[in-house]
Image (spheres, helix red, strand yellow):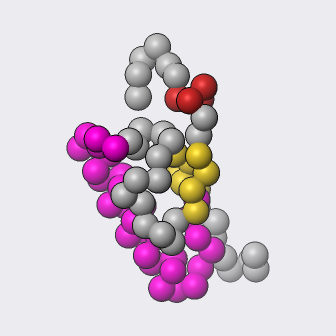
Amino acid sequence: MNKNEIAIGMNGSMLDEHPTVTGVYSFNLINNLGHLTWEKKWKPITVFTPTDTLLDKNVKIVKLSNFLLSSKYGK
């Protein structure tokens, strides 16, 4: 990575197959950033998420384990 490139990582732990309003917004934001990075030939955006459903093919996905998703407060 040269000094002018930016690496973007996003927490997508709230994403699932049945997104809420925040989830829909996150999907749209991630997919548009993914498309932008592909067009500009920038480093791909990395998303840490339990699912790859509905995400753009230009987004690098790091799957979260179920252990990391468990919380007494839910998503």
**Residue placed farthest to the bottom in the image?**
40
Residue 65 position by quadrant? top right
Q: Is residue 14 magenta?
A: no
Q: Is residue 56 left or right of residue 64?
A: left
Quadrant of the frame with the C terminus:
top left
User: Where residue 62 sits in the image (x, y, percent)?
Assistant: 61, 51
Residue at horizontal 43 percent and vertical 67 percent from the top: 56
Q: What secondary structure do most residues of the magenta stretch adopt?
A: helix
Q: Nearer the viewer, residue 4 or 71?
A: 71
Q: Is residue 40 left or right of residue 67?
A: left
User: Where residue 55 sits in the image (x, y, percent)?
Assistant: 42, 60
User: Where residue 39 sits in the image (x, y, percent)?
Assistant: 48, 85
Q: Nearer the viewer, residue 56 or 32?
A: 56
Quadrant of the frame with the N terminus:
bottom right
Q: Which residues are magenta?
A: 17-46
User: Where residue 74 sits in the image (x, y, percent)?
Assistant: 41, 22
**Residue placed farthest to the left in the image?**
21
- The answer to whether 41 is drawn above or below residue 13 in the figure is below
Residue at horizontal 56 percent and vertical 29 percent from the top: 66
